[in-house]
Amino acid sequence: GPPPGPTAGSGALFSALTLGTAEVAGFGSFSRVLLSLLGFAVLVSFVVLLVLAVRTSSRLRGTAVPLPTPGRPEPATAVSPTRSTLRSPSVGPPPSVGPPTGSGTGLAPAAAASVDRRALTGALLGLGSVLGATALGGSLDRSQGSIPDTSGTAGTAAVTPTGETTTISVSMAEMRFTPDRLEVPAGNTLVIELSNDDPHDVHDLVLATGATSGRLQPGESTVLDGGVVAHGMEGWCSIVGHRAMGMTLSVVATGAAAGTSAVGGAVAAASGHDELARVGADMMAAPGPGVAVRDARLPAATGPQQRVTLEVVEVAAEIAPGVTMDAITYGGAVVGPVLRSELGARLTVDLVNHGSMGHSLDLHAGRVSPDQAMRTIPPGEQLEYAITTDHAGIWLYHCSTMPMSVHLSAGMVGALVVPPPELAPVEREFVLVQSEHYLVPVGAPGSESTTHEGALPVSPVKIAAERPDLTVFNGHATQYVRSPLEARVGERVRLWVLAAGPSRGISFHVVGGVFDTVFKEGAYLLRPEDGEGGGAQALDLAAAQGGFVELVFDEPGTYTAVNHSFVEMERGARALIRVTA
């Protein structure tokens, strides 16, 4: 990240030392080099002068220097008295040694004036050297781009309006503005005739000045008044993730004075808030008031025909103590409901979009053409998505609207469990879906785009940098720490695990337990009846993979199910299992 800016005190001190001729912000690399060389020259001079002073002191050691007598001029030459003469009591008391008239230095007036002139000349020469090096370095820095050249930029916003209007039609579709470069004579008023020609998705346009079109449904149009164009600026779609997908445009002020272009993101850079700063949470605290602990038990078996409705709802959802996310969900909770289907059954999902942007559904367990079943539907619409569950496993379902990473991180993931044939019954059966979440820190660029007060938006910047803030089971970091899963000694426990992503996998481990059964991606890797006496310590899953493990607890106690990639565990991928006698 950028280096920290100067404090007010340090900035004032620097300005004082340079007599107000320079500021810390304009102190670039060339300035530092020149002043460093000047400082080095001073240090070398000091060493030379120190050596000369020592030599002179050695040469004059033992030589008496006569003191001036008031009212009497100094002789041209002085004869050094012998040591015996200096010590002889017959010499009598020393004469008065007060300073000569008109001088406080003990020197003759002419000598004192000479010393004062030399001191003043040296001081002025030193100060001039510092100011000259600072000025020369600042000029080189600006010319070479080490620091911004702000000369001539003061008052650039004060362009003279021409009274004329430039009207440009702009289309929005496929994560692009067309055209994406708008040339406007400086001083003209910009009017944008904006239309959303995307057949499925919602878009908008926000200009760096703050002017905004509001969200447009597919087929809608509006007119955006961009005001008088004084300088170049950026525009973008504020729908989460769309700007990161490249949905931006630039307004170019033709004929504007040089140096008046506004750089997109300048406000962000000036904010001083790090976009990648981690949003932390107290991993030992209880979920907040009103947060319902998700029932982790596998739903009961369903018949050969099943129809469910998944409603897209945008909510403010707590995903860790004190951390609320601007969430997009299937059914109102981060990580959608666990669905269950039987082998060969027909599953029909009715997707209803109550959100403010386009969404879709991808059921990994089905074999269907994505063109229709997985198409993005705009707000207010719905679609029917039917599959046959021909293969066993725990399958991911998620939103497949671009950018998918943003929609998944916002909560649009879930699990569909299809048990393998002749699966033996167990006393306890739980489902844990791991997901990771990337949040915009308070005050960082993008934090103002939240749609719920107190919630943090999803951060496309952190997603691209692979810097998750939280990795959680079933939508909340501490729900199973404060409300553990329950089992008894001797019971067989089956744990279904899904790595929902969008990007992280899992190395699933139960501290204090050994797996005697491992089923991964449709196949058994380990079973007790194999006769090999083997056991497993972890179930490794990449993003979008799933499986289950089984184990029996021999002793009562509190066991911990974790992602053994411990950095993920410390971000929240942790659940306790309380085993009683």
Image: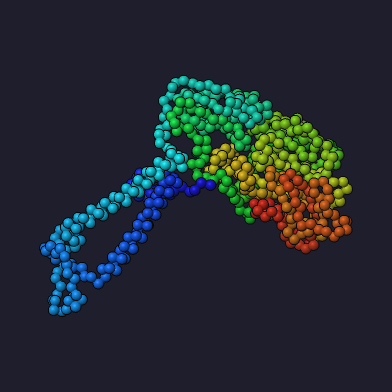
Q: Look at the picture and state if 356 lies above or below 284.
A: above
Left or right: residue 464 compared with residue 85: right
Residue 515 occupies quadrant: bottom right
Left or right: residue 225 compared with residue 510: left
- State the residue lying farthest toward the bottom: 89
- State the residue lying farthest toward the top: 164
**Quick one: 231 or 102, which is closer to the camera?**
102
Which residue occupies 60% across, 28% down? Answer: 177
> Could you say where residue 293 lies in the image, as x and y percent from the top left?
69, 49
Which residue occupies 72% across, 39% down? Answer: 398
**Quick one: 303 or 97, which is closer to the camera?**
97
Q: Look at the picture and state if 572 lies above or below 141.
A: below
Q: Is residue 424 visible?
A: yes
**Quick one: 10 or 365, which is closer to the camera?**
10
> Could you say where residue 220 lies in the image, as x and y percent from the top left?
62, 24
> Could you say where residue 399 lies in the image, as x and y percent from the top left?
70, 37
Q: Is residue 8 visible?
A: no
Residue 236 occupies quadrant: top right
Which quarter of the rendering shows the C terminus?
Answer: bottom right
Which residue occupies 53% across, 32% down? Answer: 234
Q: How many marks?
A: 0
> Could you say where residue 444 lies in the image, as x and y percent from the top left?
54, 43
Which residue occupies 74% across, 49% down? Answer: 541
